[in-house]
Amino acid sequence: MPALLELQRAFAGALVQEYERGVWAHITEDGFNAAERLRIYRNTCRATLIETLRMAYPAVERLVGCEFFEHAAGKFVERHPARSGYLNEYGAAFPVFLAGLEAAGELPYLADVGRFEWALSVAANAEDRPVLDPGALLGVAGEHHAELRFAPHPSVSCLELAYPADEIADAVLAGDGAAMRKVDLTSGPVRIVVHRGANGLETERLCARAYELVSLLCAGEPLGRVIEAAPEQAPVLLAEQLGKGRLSVFTIAR
Amino acid sequence: MIPASAGVGLRFAHHRAVLDERPAAAWFEVHAENYMGGGKPLAYLEAIRRDYPVALHGVALSLGSAEGLDARHLRRLAELAGRIDPALVSEHLAWTASGGTHFPDLLPLPLTEESLGVVCRNVERAQQVLGRLLLENPSSYLRYRHSTIPEWEFVAAIAARTGCGILCDVNNIYVSACNHGFDALAYLRALPAQAVAEFHLAGHRLRKLEDGRSIRIDDHGSRVAPEVWALYAEAVTLLGPRPTLIEWDTDVPPLAVLLEEAAHAERILRRERADACAA
């Protein structure tokens, strides 16, 4: 009789690898053999994870079609088991996986659309955390301003993408062929900040300079460094980030 | 406190309808894992919680894991419970994680003394954090050669040892009884009535293979089967009226269909209360 720990590891192995037979000998076979019984559980796990990806990547699915999406998601699921029981965390690596798919080569922007959609999913599901009240900064003495470091709201993602993934996602989800045809794939990189504001999900395109500064702020770099990089722009950008609710807390780090 | 009335499993598709229409459901139950983030889903749930009792039903705590509980998942469940103040918290007699991999299905346990010890330890740990849990019997599609304890005795023993309640899923008993050839009514008769705190009802499908074999799959994708309604009526008579939930998770229909199913359950509960009064 196997110990429970050993049995569960063997069962888990059989769910990941169909021909992993370690657990078969411990399963009663009346009417259905062990492989058939295990397949019921494997199929449910697989279908649930594919559905989880489908929910997070609707524009990717529209771009490649249901059949290809099912195939690609199935391959992804085989290589990337869930590491948490909270499935909203599942699928972060799907865009990188898409980028490596030879069959998706005709859509060079596919992985960028995936990155954009993952940022939307993160923003939609991020935990509720209070946004930083700008008034709280009034109490910080002037000599400490350069030492201020900010943490972004957990819904914030900063994306630098080679293709205009936001336009592509909007056009494909709206089924707007004309808008899709207007997308200029050669327009160069786009920089987008995604977050969840008081009125829902917000996406904003930034110029290269502003993106660099917002990225520095959101990476927790000291305010002094941001001001050094752009003495004139930094105060306005900081005020904008506070106003949009993209910052959550601050610390003073000497 | 949830009354011994019929409630409905709340799904995202019905958030808006519940808030706009204030349906006559006695209570709602949600899958805890669907609300562990923030944003809109949690805001809807909090708004609905202001007007209805809510139960949290976990699907990924893995109470049957020999490795013990995932502390992060337990913490998330506790944070959600702290925010929603649920009237009941329930989980499953199953395992869903091993070696750091999580499987989104309720995997079956061998019913042995060792498993009983593992589940009791995990239930006690969870109850230290969450308060009293209800434990649900899952549907199953396989059994282990080395199981030594019938499922109904296993469930009753966990309740006796840990003080947890029993969430008696009548559809699951029916599905497993058909798949494994045991007597569903005998299962119900063996449960300690005082520990049973909730019933679940859902649809399942009969999967027929070309070679004539068949197996019942608990897919929560249709109305409650007539045989399950009959078994539920027996359960209510044997174990008493309890809060009863209509679950529907795949091909989710309009809310009105779930409310019709809940009304059916309510009629059975009412009939039992009337019979009890007459007696």
Image: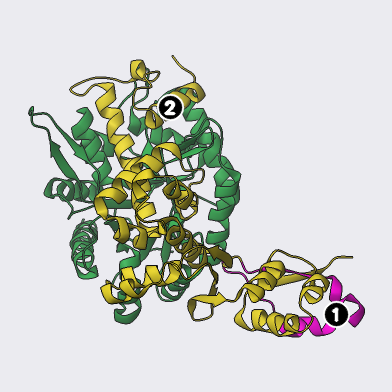
Amino acid carrying label 2: it is: Gly
> What is the x, y in percent for residue B269?
23, 59
Q: Is residue A138 magenta?
A: yes
Which quadrant would the N terminus of chain A be assigned to in this image? top left
Q: Which mark is residue A88?
A: none
In the displayed structure, would residue B10 be above or below residue B220? below
Q: Is residue B76 magenta?
A: no
Q: Which mark is residue A140?
A: 1
Residue name at image x 74 percent, y 80 percent: A234
Q: Which residue is mark 2?
A: A13
The residue marked by circle 2 belongs to what chain? A
Using the image as rendered, state which of residue B181 and residue B223 is in the foreground.
B223
Residue name at image x 80 percent, y 68 percent: A222
Apparent colour of chain B: green
Mark 2, secondary structure of its residue: helix
Q: Which residues are magenta?
A: A127-153
Residue B141 seen in render: no
Apparent colour of chain A: yellow
Residue name at image x 56 percent, y 64 percent: A160
Amino acid carrying label 1: it is: Val
